[in-house]
Image (cartoon, helix red, strand yellow):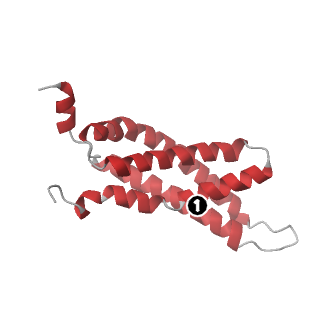
Amino acid sequence: MSRALSRAKATARVAALPRIVIYVVGTGLWLTGALWLLFHYLLKRQGWLGGVQPLESWWLRLHGAFAFVAIWTFGLLWGTHVVPGWWTRRRARSGIVLVVFVAWLMVSAYLLYYLGDEEQRFIVSVLHWSVGLSGPVLFMAHRWRDRAHPSGH
């Protein structure tokens, strides 16, 4: 049997512990980002110290911490799930969408941190969080794709 064929027959299924890590990190990342948006845009209050919601900076710090762990988790998934999954071709389209999604979020986060121009930062910020909010839908579409379309149908 050829090496490529044996790889194609291999599974790209994620083991239980890494799957739990993915769920926890993904949920934490999404939730802290959504809470930052909520506190930044909807819960600002005008006080004698200004219009900054005190918890806003903490949500952003937690979001950054989850993002750091998410980059590590993505690296782990690359070797244990993405590459083996590429050989099986199962869920390849939704997998490619997820990889592009993660790459965009990493690049845009880098730009948010290092761009000096506030107008450019605002544009990148809107693009970052508007794409980021779609994360759970993209993940669920990839995760449960086979259940909606069983093979042979």
Q: Residue furthest right?
A: 48
- In the image, residue 48 sits, relative to residue 139, either above or below, namely below
Q: Residue at x 88, y 71 (%)?
A: 48
Going 70% across and 55% down the picture, which residue do you hit?
123
Across and down, in percent, residue 136 comes to 44, 61
Quadrant position of the C terminus in the picture: bottom left
Who's the residue at 63% across and 59% down the image? 59
Q: Residue furthest left?
A: 1
Please name whichever residue, 137 or 15, is drawn nearer the observer in this view of the structure: 137
Kind of residue at disc 1? Ser
Near-viewer residue (23 or 105) = 105
Element at badge 1? helix
**Which residue appears at 82% of the width and 74% of the height?**
46
**Left or right side of 6 for 50:** right
Q: How many marks?
A: 1
Quadrant of residue 114 within the rendered picture: top right
Q: Residues within 10 Å of mark 1 (few under 14, many from 20)?
A: few
What residue would you read off at disc 1? Answer: 130
Instruction: Classify 117 as above or below 146.
Output: above
Quarter of the image with the N terminus is: top left
Residue 22 horizontal/vertical position (percent)? 40, 51
Q: Quadrant of residue 78?
A: top left
Residue sitting at the far top: 2
